[in-house]
Image (cartoon, rainbow, N blue to C red):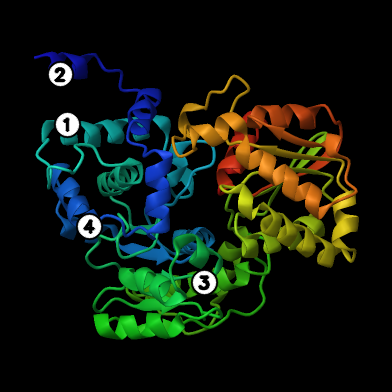
Amino acid sequence: MLPTLLRMARQKTYAEAISLLNTCQSNAATIEAIRKSGGRLNDFAIPEMHDYLRRIGYVPDDLDKLNVVHVTGTKGKGSTSAFTERILRAHLPGQIGLYTSPHLCAVRERIRINGEPLSEELFARYFFEVWERLEADQKTLTPHTPVFPIYFRLLTLLAFHTFLSLGVTATVLEVGIGGTYDSTNIVPKPITTGITSLGLDHQAVLGNTIEEIARNKAGIYKPGVPALSVVQENGGGDILERTAKEVGAPFEFVPMIPETPLGLHGTHQRINASLAVALSKSFLSTRGQPFTETLPESFIQPLAKTKWPGRCQKVEQSPTTWLLDGAHTIESLRSCGEWAWTEAKPDVLIFNCSGGRAGESLLGSLLDAGAKTSGGTREELGAGFDTVIFCTNVTYVDGNFKGDLTSKAIDPNDLSQLLTQTALRDAWLKLNTSFPPDRVHAVPSIEHAVNIVRSLGTKQVLVAGSLHLVGGVMEVAGLQAALSMD
């Protein structure tokens, strides 16, 4: 009787939904183990997702009604998904669903309809429908399977339920981690699938070879479903092609599209746009809209209008110019440096990353790319900064997170002692030996960092190293209007 009364008393608000969702977060040690395994830690991952799907009232074949474009890769899969969604939206009637991760300011950004985040009202409605179905049927697949799935799995179930409830025309579905064992990989027959660039930066993080990474990503390929990939300059392409053949999926390396204006900045975006064009052509050909050109005329405007918040994004907020890019690998930080010093001359840096020991190579890549773009040296570029701030991803000065930005994935010992931030500060001073140490700050929250920026007057602030950091800065600095994809 008591659980029933508790359910009746529960407030079915967005805030309450986020509070319950956060109980499903894994701690720092679990996240690290999953990350190092490439998402393969749990051999029961896919069977468990099938069982969770059953418990909320669906079978896998129901997911084919979503008309899925499934996208994975090491880098660029979010941008590719954004380009693809925008093209499909311009060519199809009805509503286009988009599921991506992570979010910047609000969890509901992960589930979008026609480019807009799900409203708080709809998020709460569909969340509690999923939650209460799981609550009502607590028979799990194994004794070790939790009654409520971990954070990303629950959001994936919520996305499926939302899109099915709304009857979307098409769904662009971005993989979370890896491919084979990812919770999104339970759609029996997507319309088409695509793999973005496989980067070597993640090879070291995951402890795998590029061949193993490619094999994992190719796990999204399905029999009879087009299997597309960009040309893999760092290797792995042969593995993708071979795996597609083994699966029985028609394989293609997509051609590079001609130069055309893109709504997303950075030279690498042409690669992502090329895959998006090929995915869209593949999808639309099944809907009676065949295209033979490498870049159809009707795709040009959607590509130019595509937005992807927090990635190479310039936001003016007098007296501050914010340059926001969640780049967090060596290669993406090179692209960030090229973009940032093309757009402006940053004189404040706010930075964070998941491991301070990699700080010297990450910061060095950013500075070297900026120096090459601006025609100077790394030392000259570093000296051009007025202030450098390394902060945690904690949102507020009081040590609390905004509900949507709560993270249990931060090691509490690291956090309390600012170990990562201190290591980054040391790396900066090692790279820039003449830089005044009193202008390099290691602070415990994003609000601390934004307060420092506010005290400096007119500045051009580059925020990089972590999408979670970028989202926190957008929240604290009041830049939420920049989250729209329209």
Q: Secondary structure at mark 4?
A: helix
* Badge 1 or badge 2: first in the primary sequence: 2
Q: Secondary structure at mark 2?
A: helix
Q: Marks 2/3: CA distance?
A: 48 Å
Q: Marks 1/4: CA distance?
A: 20 Å
Position in image of residue 169 (x %, y %): 33, 57
The residue under the point 67% across, 76% down is 259
Q: On the rendered structure, is 229 left or right of 364? A: left
Q: Marks 3/4: CA distance?
A: 25 Å
Q: Marks 1/2: CA distance?
A: 10 Å
Mark 3 nearby-residue class (10 Å; few <14, some 14–19, many ≥20): many
Position in image of residue 141 (x %, y %): 12, 47
* Badge 1 or badge 4: first in the primary sequence: 4
**Residue sitting nearer the eye, 125 or 393:** 393
Name the amino acid type tagged 4.
Ile
Q: Marks 2/4: CA distance?
A: 30 Å
Residue that carries the numbered disc 2 in the rendered image: 3
Q: Is residue 289 visible?
A: no
The residue under the point 89% across, 50% down is 383
Relative height, residue 101 to residue 68 (above, below): above
* Badge 2 or badge 4: first in the primary sequence: 2
